[in-house]
Every structure is written in C-alpha cells, then in structure tokens.
Image (cartoon, grey):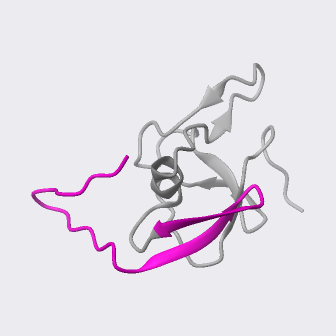
Amino acid sequence: MRIHQHPILSFDKRKTLNFTYNGQTLEGFEGDTIASALHAQGIKMLSESIHLKRPRGFYCAIGNCASCNMVVNGEPNVRTCITPLEEGMEVRLQEGKGHIR
C-alpha cells in the first residue's frame, strides 16, 4: 500500500534502496521511512507489547508512540516511523525492551 499522489508531498520513486529485515532482503524508495517501506512490503507488525506479546503496527507515524521500535544496525529502540531508509540497513524485530550490546 502506497500513496501515489498527494497535494503537498512529492514522491520520487526513481531510486530504490535495498535493506534487510530479519535477514530477508527487501527494497524501498528513497524518501521512505523504515516503517513505510516495511508497510509497503506487506509487513504490518513492527513490534510486540513487552508483557503480553501483542502485535504493534504503524500507529502514529510521528515518533510519539513506541509501536514501531525496532533494532536498526544493531541499535535498539529506533523509532522506524521517523527514521529515513538508507541503503544496506539491517532492520529486525526487537524483543522486549531492547538491550545495548
């Protein structure tokens, strides 16, 4: 699911970026956030609630909630809804609160 036209925003889909999600190679577009690229690929669950392990998805898209916290390039608690996608990023689900290595 992608927005193709918007009255204010422009979407340049000429440059694709490759990244990995839980070891699987995916692709997004320059200008995507990590969460928007995952959502466009059909990946709706971005995290789990800490205690009950309930799925969490793309919710606020402005970095206010913790529903999109993932491990990005080894760093836990990255808010993927506001983090721009970059070539070669390694993204994976975060288990629990996240631990610094």
Whether residue 25 sits left or right of residue 28 in the image: it is right
Instruction: Please provide percent x and percent y for residue 49.
Output: 69, 28
Question: 77 or 24: which is nearer to us?
Answer: 24
**On the image, which quarter does residue 56 sit in?**
top right
**On the image, which quarter does residue 72 sit in?**
bottom right
Asked if residue 21 lies in the magenta stretch, the reply is: yes
Magenta residue span: 1-28
Quarter occupied by the C terminus: bottom right
Of all residues, the one furthest to the right in this rendering is 101
Question: 25 or 47: which is nearer to us?
Answer: 25
Residue displayed at 38% across by 70% down:
31
Whether residue 100 sits left or right of residue 29 in the image: it is right
Whether residue 44 sits left or right of residue 99 in the image: it is left
Instruction: Please provide percent x and percent y for residue 32.
Output: 42, 64
Residue displayed at 33% across by 72% down:
13
Instruction: Please provide percent x and percent y for residue 25.
Output: 67, 65
Q: How many numbered marks are there?
A: 0
State whether residue 9 is above or below residue 47. Answer: below
Does the magenta stretch mainly form a helix, a strand or a loop? loop
Instruction: Please provide percent x and percent y for residue 83.
Output: 51, 63
Whether residue 91 sits left or right of residue 87 in the image: it is right
Asked if residue 19 lies in the magenta stretch, the reply is: yes
State whether residue 51 is above or below residue 72. Answer: above
Question: 14 or 82: which is nearer to us?
Answer: 14
Residue displayed at 9% across by 57% down:
7
